[in-house]
Image (cartoon, rainbow, N blue to C red):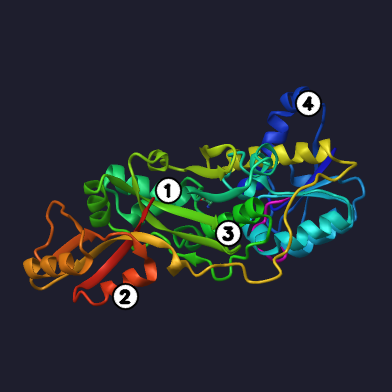
Amino acid sequence: MNVAILGYGVVGSGVAKVLKENSKTIEEKTGHEFKVTRILDIRDFPLSEYRTIITKNFEDIANDKDIDIVVETMGGVEPAFGFVTTCLEKGKHVVTSNKELVAVKGAQLLATARKNNVNFLFEASVGGGIPVIRPVSRCLAGNNITKVSGILNGTTNYILTKMITEGVSFEAALKNAQELGYAEKDPSADVDGIDAMRKICILASLCFGTHLSPDGVYCEGIRRVTLADVAYAEKFGSVIKLVARAEKLADGKVFAAVSPCFVKKANMLSGVNDVYNACFVDGDMVGDVLMYGKGAGSEATASAVVGDIIDCADNSKERKFFGWEPACEDILSDYTDKETALYVRCTVTDKAEACRRLKSIFGKVVFLWRKDQPENEVAFVTPVMKERQLRKVLSTTGVSVVTTIRIFE
Ligand code: HSE
């Protein structure tokens, strides 16, 4: 089968590499032969072995009747959305690694694929190389899934791991992640939690059956996490991780949020380090399932794309039953209704008085300490209550809050 690739960047070039280097294995395992016949990119690649098939003109791909499967690895909503829509309408199967596209336009593109009896698959959009989308939609289809959570961004997990294990600054760790090709071109999508938010929206849509738009989902990144917070987390028997969570509530609404959290060392997510991702899915029959693997990187992500290419070839005549429905109303719950405990780092003028006051207001408070703790700094963990109420109470304590981090249960 003939494959075209839109975007010859980190993932697109990885796809060409996997299809070429593992062609024999793929053919032996699946009976399919794949050939990359066109690549779209606005840049020139004069030294590439694919230079003769690289085009700057999308029409060369859209109008090529011999192309069966189009891989979209450009990123962003436009022009990717227009290109993917055209390809689906022209009867081509589309495979994408583009989480922004799937999170924002997933329901629309799934409907277009349905209408044109072709596949629109996106395993690589969540968890890089980890099989997540297919196991959730197929292997766990006998379950009602009400909760999904995990570490879904490799770059931030890499940065946090460096901070925790090597005491490296946030900036130095970010630079290192970019050099290794993990971080997006614009690292704010990673470090501000937006990438993880898009991924949790995709998972929530798939697990709960209704499109969850990223608009309005609570999203907080790791820019404000310091080595002081890392030290206090250690005293609480925890590590700091960027956790993405979604839960289907009894009233039909969906709670979804991305934020740094203290994760207790007894929780398996605490041991997920470097660029690795992990995703917990809670099914009513199976219980907790944990999927773990490399969440970013050229070849790992390309591995997931190639799995989808093979799936398209397996289902080339008859479209797979797969996806979710558009949401007809706002299904997002108010995140401040969620119960949580908070780690708080604050400055005070009179430490003894502040601690006495915090204890009398909150009842049970766990005070934390660290090496070289400034005289005017207090750190503590509150009891569990609704976040809205917690923040209201906190504002009455008289301390000057520097930062807060949720405790992940
Ligand atoms: N920048 C993303 C990450 C790439 O770090 O997880 C994979 O989606």
- The outermost residue toward the top is 28
Q: Amino acid under label 3?
A: Arg
Does mark 1's beta carbon lie closer than 8 Å to ligand 1? yes
Which circle's residue, 4 or 2, is located before the other in the chain? 4
Name the element at disc 4: helix
Can residue 185 be seen by looking at this rendering?
A: no
Q: Are marks 4 and 2 in contact (CB under 8 Å)?
A: no
Q: Nearer the viewer, residue 72 or 203?
A: 203
Label 2: which residue?
Answer: 392
Label 2: few (<14), some (14–19) or many (≥20) C-alpha neighbours in 10 Å:
few
Can residue 183 be seen by looking at this rendering?
A: yes
Q: Amino acid under label 1?
A: Asn
Which circle's residue, 1 or 2, is located before the other in the chain? 1
Nearer mark to the viewer, of 3 and 1 = 3
Q: Are marks 3 and 4 in contact (CB under 8 Å)?
A: no
Specify start and end residues of the magenta stretch as a single range: 71-79
**Dividing the image into 4 quarters, which one contains the N terminus?**
top right
Q: Is residue 182 left or right of residue 214?
A: left
Q: Nearer the viewer, residue 172 or 78?
A: 78
Name the element at disc 1: helix
- The number of numbered discs placed on residues in the rendered structure image is 4
Q: CA distance from mark 3 to mark 1?
A: 16 Å
Q: Is residue 225 left or right of residue 205?
A: left
Label 3: which residue?
Answer: 198
Q: CA distance from mark 4 to mark 1?
A: 35 Å
